[in-house]
Image (tube, rainbow, N blue to C red):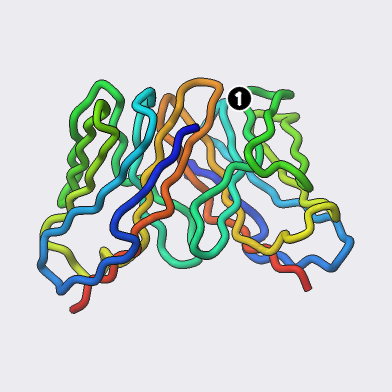
Amino acid sequence: DGGITQSPKYLFRKEGQNVTLSCEQNLNHDAMYWYRQDPGQGLRLIYYSQIVNDFQKGDIAEGYSVSREKKESFPLTVTSAQKNPTAFYLCASMGNTEAFFGQGTRLTVV
Amino acid sequence: KQEVTQIPAALSVPEGENLVLNCSFTDSAIYNLQWFRQDPGKGLTSLLLIQSSQREQTSGRLNASLDKSSGRSTLYIAASQPGDSATYLCAVWLGYGQNFVFGPGTRLSVLP
């Protein structure tokens, strides 16, 4: 069953804590993306990666970090430097020219 | 900088109506345009992909058109059903090595 899997579905973070969101794909796609979605706003790009061991900052990269050690995996770490991390996070991968999305992770600061 | 807008922001229609959702982008130098559907609390589901060289794509009751020169795309939904209720987003892809730019979405409610 091919697709993109994000985990966990819900995540709670305490103040000052780093948390990591997982994104795995078995579609053999080279490009992967992380977006943030806030209520009433469009999707905003955090980071993207075109190939293994390479990634670029998006529009709102501050307070986030990523790695791309394997083609299938593109984890996103939300660091304590991110002052307002409560949001819905979406991961996508792209094959040929069409994008496919995971089901999202909702992160809440408690 | 590429900007994408969608009109209307929200739409409520009775079941059975045909409807049109609009998407506009400021820079015509796009590689393709994709329409997505998002249900509350869920990820995005791809509906239609239109390459920059194409004028339209169809899937079932959905038809999407693209006028690249004027920076516009429309999503036509025929014979709407309550199950069509969702937020519809359009996104333009700027090409290899670049990212997608999304519109804010149109929230559709189809009333039984």
Which residue sits furthest bottom?
B112
Give the class, few, some or many, for how many residues have Cα within 10 Å of label 1's Cα (few <14, many ≥20).
Answer: many
Q: Amino acid at mark 1?
A: Gln
Q: Quadrant of the C terminus of chain B?
A: bottom left
Q: Quadrant of residue A14?
A: bottom right
Percent across and percent down for residue B108 are: 29, 65
When the figure is inspected, residue B14 is found, relative to residue A24, above or below; the finding is: below
Left/right of residue A53 with respect to residue B45 in the rendered view: right
- The number of callouts visible is 1
Percent across and percent down for residue B67 are: 22, 31
Residue drawn 78% across the image and 74% down it: A110
Residue drawn 37% across the image and 60% down it: B87
Percent across and percent down for residue A21 are: 71, 51
User: Disc 1: which chain?
Assistant: A
When the figure is inspected, residue B74 is found, relative to residue A19, above or below; the finding is: above
**Of residues B71 and A34, the one drawn nearer to the viewer in this rendering:** B71
The residue where tag 1 is placed is A50
Left/right of residue B37 with respect to residue A37 in the rendered view: left
Residue drawn 79% across the image and 65% down it: A13
**Of residues A88 and B20, the one drawn nearer to the viewer in this rendering:** B20
**Of residues A66 and A57, the one drawn nearer to the viewer in this rendering:** A57
When the figure is inspected, residue B13 is found, relative to residue A32, above or below; the finding is: below
Q: Secondary structure at mark 1?
A: strand
Q: Quadrant of residue A59?
A: top right
Residue drawn 38% across the image and 51% down it: B89
Which residue sits furthest right?
A16
